[in-house]
Image (cartoon, rainbow, N blue to C red):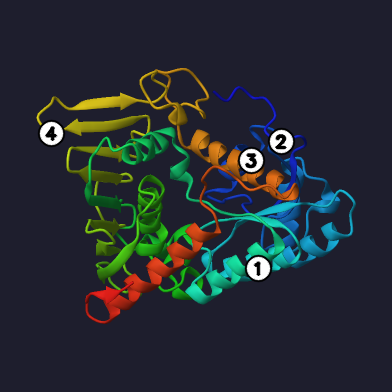
Amino acid sequence: MINGEKTVETPIRWAMIGGGRGSQIGYIHRSSAVRDHSFALLAGAFDLDPGRGKEFGISIGVDPDRCYADYRTLFAEEARREDGIEAVSIATPNSTHYEMTKAALEAGLHVICEKPLCFKTEEAEELAKIADEMGLVVGVMYGYSGHQMIEQARQMVARGDLGEIRLINMQFAHGAYHTAIEKENPAVKWRMDPRLAGPSCVIADVGTHPLFLAEAILQDFEIEQLLCSRKSFVEDRVLEDNAFILMNLKGGAQATLWASAINCGSLHGQKIRIIGSKASIEWLDEQPNQLAYEIEGEPARVLERGAAYLYPEALVEDRISAGHPEGLFDAWSNLYRRFAIAMNQSKKGEKTDFWFPDIRAGVQGVKWVEKCVESADKGAVWIEY
């Protein structure tokens, strides 16, 4: 159980790009990073408007002299300091991720980046090459994977509790964009603009989340062929607000994924169901402390976070005893804790012996979006992965 003791000897010296006032995700990044003494927020370029960014940085306790006008100045000035930053989180629109991540790696910094890592597989592979050569950690913020019942599901699959895996059914289908709210909401507008969001909306924005959950739970998850159909139902939208993806996996299993922003009445609608030859499991992100476990011929059961009957690996990151619900802030804190340990180990030349959404997860997400778009744009045809 996590009880607040130090994760690393000294907190990772850390900065943020973006995440200022009005950001949907800035606060969860900051609160999760500092929670276990893993990171110390010392600097940032929090806003496109330098004055507004500095004012915000001061309001959250950052030294005024370390609230910078832009990320290039941030990297240059911090490199001159003996106590300069060691890592940076990137919480900006998608179109900036590649250039910022590359610049950070070239400045010798570890990176935690919002997804997608970039728009093109070649760019993602280039970032992976730089990170490997520099011995740097890149974490990609697939925040839902930090929930502990994902680890329980991973262990159940690995130990054969489900038998041979046959089907994986994934979805992230909410209804928040069922009308053209981007015309009035700047925080949404950029997600519908291909110049800022990239070649996809819901496939990249929400579809990659359950995809990574499948990759984390099924350690041999490997796509061989893929078919995608995507469509925009709201008038004047360039990018899709709904998509269906079929996947044939190595070994014979099949997977489906529904990504949508027009599922009226659904708050989130993210779930993953894994069906084996003996049993099935199902996890919903709106009920993250439970994992449904259904064995053929037996009454259905629900496994609870923190319970003594779970596998030991699923209990390591408990933050409170069983029966008390944990949420997304806890999941993000778990991931930031893993990022910090990995960064600390990299400084010592040690290899990590645990999983987290790393640079390879980022590469896979970019490639998957690219292949989905290719299949859909060719008329929803099967393509080799």
Q: Residue furthest left?
A: 297
Where residue 60 sits, quadrant-wise, is top right
Residue 293 in percent (x, y) is at 24, 32
Q: Which residue has dot 2 on it?
A: 8
Q: Residues within 10 Å of mark 3 (few under 14, many from 20)?
A: many
Distance of label 3 from label 2 (alpha carbons): 12 Å
| Residue 83, x across and y down, in percent | 86, 48
- Lower position in the chain sequence, tag 3 or tag 2: 2
Q: Answer whether labels 3 and 4 touch (C-beta < 8 Å).
A: no
Q: Amino acid at mark 1?
A: Ile
| Label drawn at residue 130 | 1
Check disc 3 and give the amino acid type. Ala
Residue sitting at x 78%, y 62%: 75
**What amino acid does circle 4 point to?**
Glu
Distance from the alpha carbon under mark 2 to that under mark 4:
45 Å
Between disc 3 and disc 4, the foreground one is 4
Query: Residue at label 4?
Result: 296
Task: Give the label on residue 33, or none.
Answer: 3
